[in-house]
Amino acid sequence: MAKKLFLIIGAPGSGKTTDASLIAKKHSDSIVHYSTGDMLREEVSSGSELGQTIEGFISRGALVPLDIIIDTIISAINNAPVDTVLIDGYPRSVEQMTALDEIIAKEESIELVSVIEVRVSEQVAKERILGRAAEAAEGEERSDDSVEVFYDRMKVYTDPLAEIQAFYTDKNLLQVID
């Protein structure tokens, strides 16, 4: 039986990771949640060479190279302990969207069920990000939680958004939560 994949997209600070975590926690016997950002941050925390490369991108608010992201996601889905997988923070570019679509088309073990967009205003997103930075414990600060990086991340999110929305709308996969 194919793994059922749900992608959750949204602006930085939209609550996509929080929402997905709550859903997975409530249904832990049947749903697992992976945050693309968390998976990458774990690699950074490991201190590996790959982690150092990833940190160079994350700290600037830039996209991590496609091959690293795709390998990470496909591995997570295939190794998931249950049949329903929520992944938030992906895709963040048209290139990422297209690459995942091509792989899923070939993978009989993965079915993309829906893409859920969590929408909040830029002001709310900014307040959440800056609040998260202010509340972070010593040593737990995220390198991407600053006002300068926030605007870079918003641009990275909004630039391809219309094309991503259109692509998944045409496939009847996009659901929007305001």
Image: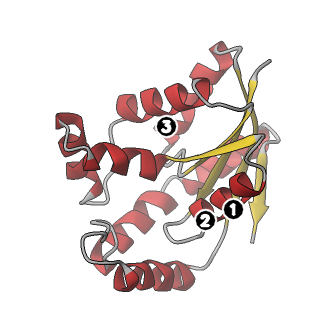
Is disc 1 placed on a helix, strand or loop?
helix
Q: Amino acid at mark 3?
A: Gln
Query: 132 above or below 26?
Result: below
Image location of residue 178, percent across then percent down? 75, 72
Image location of residue 176, percent across then percent down? 76, 61
Query: 45 above or below 139?
Result: above
Q: Nearer the viewer, mark 3 or mark 1?
A: 1
Query: 75 above or below 55?
Result: above
Q: Answer few, some or many: residues within 10 Å of disc 3's Cα (few below 14, many 20 plus, some between 14 and 19).
A: some
Is disc 2 placed on a helix, strand or loop?
helix
Q: Amino acid at mark 2?
A: Thr
Q: Which residue is mark 2?
A: 18
Please report whichever mark, 2 or 3, sits nearer to the chain's N-terminal start: 2
With 18 as the anchor, is 53 left or right in this view?
Answer: left
The reply to whether residue 128 is visible in this rendering is yes
Q: Which residue is mark 3?
A: 96
As drawn, the label of residue 22 is 1
Please report whichever mark, 3 or 1, sits nearer to the chain's N-terminal start: 1
Image location of residue 80, percent across then percent down? 62, 31
Q: Which residue is located at x 34 percent, y 72 percent? A: 145
Q: Are marks 3 and 1 in contact (CB under 8 Å)?
A: no
Q: Answer few, some or many: residues within 10 Å of disc 1's Cα (few below 14, many 20 plus, some between 14 and 19).
A: few
Q: Amino acid at mark 1?
A: Leu
